[in-house]
Image (cartoon, helix red, strand yellow):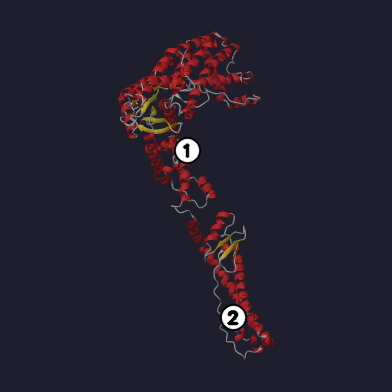
Amino acid sequence: MDRFLLKGKRPNSTRAWDTSFTDSDKNSTVEKPTPKKQKRISEVWKYFKRSDDRLFAKCLCCGKLYKTSGNTSNIRDHLKRFHSNVSVLDSSASAAEALVDNDNNKDTNDTNDNHDDNDDNDDNNDDNDDNDDKADHYDDNHDKNENNDDKIASTSGSCRSMSSVESCLERALLYDTKSKRKRDIDRALTEMVVKDMLPCTIVENEGFIEYTRVLEPRYNLPSSRHLRDVLMLHLFKETSAKLAVILENVADIAITCDLWTSSTNVSFLSVTGHFVLDYSLKTVCLARQKLIDSTDHSAQNIANTLQDILNFWNILDKTVCVVTKNSSSMLEACEILKIQNHPCFAHTLNSVVQDGLKLEDDAMKALIAKCKTIVKFFKQSSITNEKFKNVQENFASILLEESHSRWNSLHFMIERILASQEAINAVLLPIKSAPLQLTVDEIIILKDIDIILSLFQEASDKISGENYVSLVIPLAHGLFRKVHNLSSQLQTSVGERMKNTILKSITKRLSTYEQRTVTRVATILDPRFKKDGFQLNTNAEKAAIFLQHELMNLTNREPSINLDLESNTKTQDSLLDFLYQPVIRKPKNEKFDASYIKRQYLETPLAPLKMDPFLWMKASQTEFPLVKSLLFKYLCIPATSVESERLLRKAERIVSDGRTRPKEENLNILLFLNQNLWIKSKYKTLY
């Protein structure tokens, strides 16, 4: 019996082994042994190999070594993150049995290895060992059947509880709500919604949920309410605090504002701010707010609403100019607030073009109406439009319709018709119901109109791309000269009459900008133009005088300096002792200093037209420190009120058929963040 125990032969068996056991008893009934309880084996061990000391596990897929620490959390997490195609749930009972058998065999081998010395001492008892091995063979087969039943039962229980175990593991593997990774992804999600003006319900879309799950399985998407009421609101408060700090340190700011009535007949005032920061012009959204009295569109009500917004940001005293449309109520509101007003140059330019298009000329009106009919014919028939595309060889395009609210849409329509005239005639000729084709004379008239309108399109693109108020006077001057010299290019009387009408409108509407203080000073302060940007020399001289006056206000009076010498200083010649009297430096003359600075600045060469005036000043700030402050003050004023209009158009796109009833508070937060998100990257340290 001792010999069997040393060999590890069924020490837990209930059979009574004794020395009287013989071969004749082999066929007798044997009492059923108690099966050994098997330990459950995790399915992750299919993909890992345990080290001999059972403290480490090596991945069979990539070879990475992990410390097990008595559990499988580390290695399970490794499979989910780096081998997502491996599923620990798809395991069979046979795989589990194989793992158990391997583990048992290892344990048996370890036990046998520990008793090798005892086996060496039993060489004289080989005969008895043969008998014992026969008995053991019976018990091994019997126990194996019992153990197989146990293993199958254990695997079935594991399958029943696997779903709950897996859900617990998934919850354990998700990022903690306070982890940095979770906060970073939440912020990126919020900024994506803000930048692309997406609805917060995007986090409930099945496709987006699946995409996020594949991209980052450990990230749990927030609810739409949490995204809107917590994450977005938190970002709004952070951005507002940073903007308040920026505006506090800004010396001068210009604003644009526009009035808009929503589809629900509620009036809103949009306000944007413009200032120079780090030698760059910055734009921020200040508010999109209801009028104090929504039933009143008077100048006083607009002024009161605008004053509340400026007081909220503490910039009323810093506001140097308000850029608005040319409506009388907006102009009067600026007078009430005693702030300079700059009429939007884009709207004034549009008025000049409309004056030229309203020319009382029957031939021109009939021609424009004919062009609209041709475009409408192609738009109404998909077959005709497809033929039109097939006829074009190198310039496959579609015709464009005119929009009454945009003058340049007429220019685009005429431009596209002239570019594809041959293709239009090829499609219209075989169709009996098609409108009449354009004649040669009509095409020549269209070319004259296109030449005139292309100049205004160039000016519109220029002012929209750069938007410096210092461009207004030079562009007006350039337009007048270009239109005046068009006579040699125009071939028809219609084009000549249109040119003369537009020249009168330019003189009436655009020449007034040379008489405004804001545009005058901004032009002469722009290192690309200075006095050369003006049409009249008298206006340039008036601008120079006002510049000198502004420099005088900025010039600080230097205090007189007394250089007292020591009383014991003496000279041998008393006739020269005046040299050692206290020296008093006379104060400088402010007018002389301002005049000197002005002359020094104006005599410097003009900067290249493509150079940004702020970058030029950055390189010359040591030479003209006072000019720099004036440049920041006047060139922060935009030439147009386009920014406030863009803000309102964004609001129109948000309130669409799919989002008909967003709360005004949430809509304002979304617009504010969309416009001001650049502050995040500029001031990360304020987070």
In the rendered image, residue 65, in percent from the top left (x then y), is placed at: 58, 61
Q: Is residue 5 above or below residue 186?
A: below
Q: Position of residue 576 (x, y in %)?
A: 36, 23
Left or right of 307 in this view: 39 = right
Dot label at residue 195: 1
Q: Residue at x 47, y 27 (%)?
A: 620
Check the image and report above or below for 90 versus 513. below
In the rendered image, residue 229, in percent from the top left (x then y), is placed at 39, 44
The image quadrant that residue 104 belongs to is: bottom right
> Disc 2 vs disc 1: which is toward the camera?
1
Q: Kindly tell me whether residue 576 is visible in this rendering.
A: yes
User: What's the residue type where badge 1 is placed?
Assistant: Lys
Q: Is residue 125 left or right of residue 277?
A: right
How far from the left and from the top, in percent, is residue 130?
A: 68, 85
Q: Tell me: residue 364, above or below residue 614.
A: above
Crowd band around label 2 with a 10 angstrom C-alpha radius: few (<14), some (14–19), many (20+): some
Categorize mark 1 by other alpha carbons within 10 Å: few (<14), some (14-19), many (20+): some
Q: Earlier in the sequence, mark 2 or mark 1?
A: 2
The residue beneath circle 2 is: 10
Residue 547, visible in the rendered structure:
no
- Whether pointer 2 and pointer 1 mark residues with C-beta atoms closer than 8 Å, the reply is no
Q: Left or right: where does residue 389 sit relative to residue 206?
A: right
Q: Please give the label number shown on residue 181.
A: none
Direction front: furthest residue: 572
Q: Please state, as top left, top right, bottom left or bottom right, where the N terminus lies in the image.
A: bottom right
Q: Secondary structure at mark 1?
A: helix
In the image as oriented, which residue stretches furthest toward the top?
493
Q: Amino acid at mark 2?
A: Arg
Q: Quadrant of the C terminus?
A: top left
Distance in Å between CA atoms under marks 2 and 1: 72 Å
Question: What's the residue at 54%, 70% (across, down)?
Answer: 39
Instruction: Describe the element under mark 2 as helix, strand or loop.
Output: loop
